[in-house]
Image (cartoon, grey):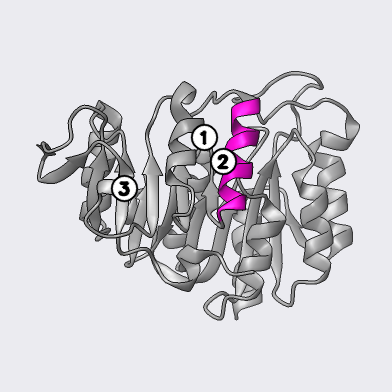
Amino acid sequence: MIAPFLASFPRRVVVFNPTGRYATAQVASMREAGTHLIGGIALGRGGESLDGLALYDDVRELPEPADAAVIYTPPEGVLDAVRAAAGIPTIVVAAEYVPVHDTLRAAQAARAAGSWLVGPNTLGLCVPEEGLLGSIAPSFCTPGRVAVMCRSGTLTLTMARLLTAAGIGQRAVMHIGGDTIAGRNPHEYLAALAADKRTDAVLYCGEIGGDKEYALAEAIRACPKPVVTMLVGRHAPAEKRMGHAGALVGGARESAAAKLAALAAGGARTARDPAEAIGILKEMLQ
């Protein structure tokens, strides 16, 4: 399994709904990071431009096929936007609070079309010195061979900065999305990274809630590369949402302790905090 953005970083990126304040700022950041944007989709504004970005009413009007789409559509419009973008190899959905059934249908539509859906509720991904899809600050990252994937947006940014400060470069920094349902799950990212020749080790930062880590634990058994895992929320009370929709412990199986035990049994090195995770990576990479 190869994630399209790892095989070759996208060179023809389209932005859906680029006209809002947040999206406008992220368009500027992506350009500054070297991402090549070929247009924006803004219904009713086709033929206009925004800060030099040509706007179109429909993705079919783009001057050339896109190889990535970044979607800043509000939650209620995500399903239609993903369906419109289906077939584009990489699709990044920023919106939080997308209705669960819409996310399920969007993920299904993306998979059926052969697209890799990142998110919803994601900061996107950054491949240092190659490009940015979303809102991970490129200045936090530095090129290297450790792939970082996180469920938490805040932890994504924190680990990128700490790794860079520790002199550990990143192959890619990826926020898979904080909602209960994600377009692609951690074990799928791990399978892609296992096949990636530029990845030497993987750092996974998870959270309480859900059961995605159990499939990841099984995938670690078959991964030829070392995997370090860290989970936040060890002290969270049961059945209380912590931060966002995906971080809700519904039972002992969804707690940090249970997941860490499963990941360790699968062959991962487990860390209690970022400092320990960085120490383990330094030891591995010597």
What residue do we see at 42% from left, 60% from top? 165
Q: Are marks 2 and 1 in contact (CB under 8 Å)?
A: yes
Q: Quadrant of the N terminus?
A: bottom right
Q: Is residue 112 magenta?
A: yes
Mark before the other along the chain sequence, 2 or 3: 3
Q: Position of residue 195 (x, y in %)?
A: 63, 76
- At label 1, counting other C-alpha atoms closer than 10 Å, the crowd grade (few under 14, some 14-19, many 20 or more) is many
Q: Position of residue 81 (x, y in %)?
A: 43, 35
Q: Secondary structure at mark 2?
A: loop
Q: Position of residue 160 (x, y in %)?
A: 46, 54
Mark before the other along the chain sequence, 2 or 1: 1
Q: Secondary structure at mark 1?
A: loop
Q: Residue furthest top?
A: 240
Q: Is residue 116 visible?
A: yes
Q: Are marks 3 and 1 in contact (CB under 8 Å)?
A: no
Tell me the residue that label 2 is attached to.
177
Region of the chain picked out in magenta, as a range: 101-113
> Could you say which disc has been placed on residue 121 in the image?
1
Mark before the other along the chain sequence, 3 or 1: 3
Tell me the residue that label 3 is attached to.
60
Q: Position of residue 63 (x, y in %)?
A: 21, 56
What residue do we see at 70% from left, 72% from top? 226
Q: Is residue 191 left or right of residue 219?
A: left
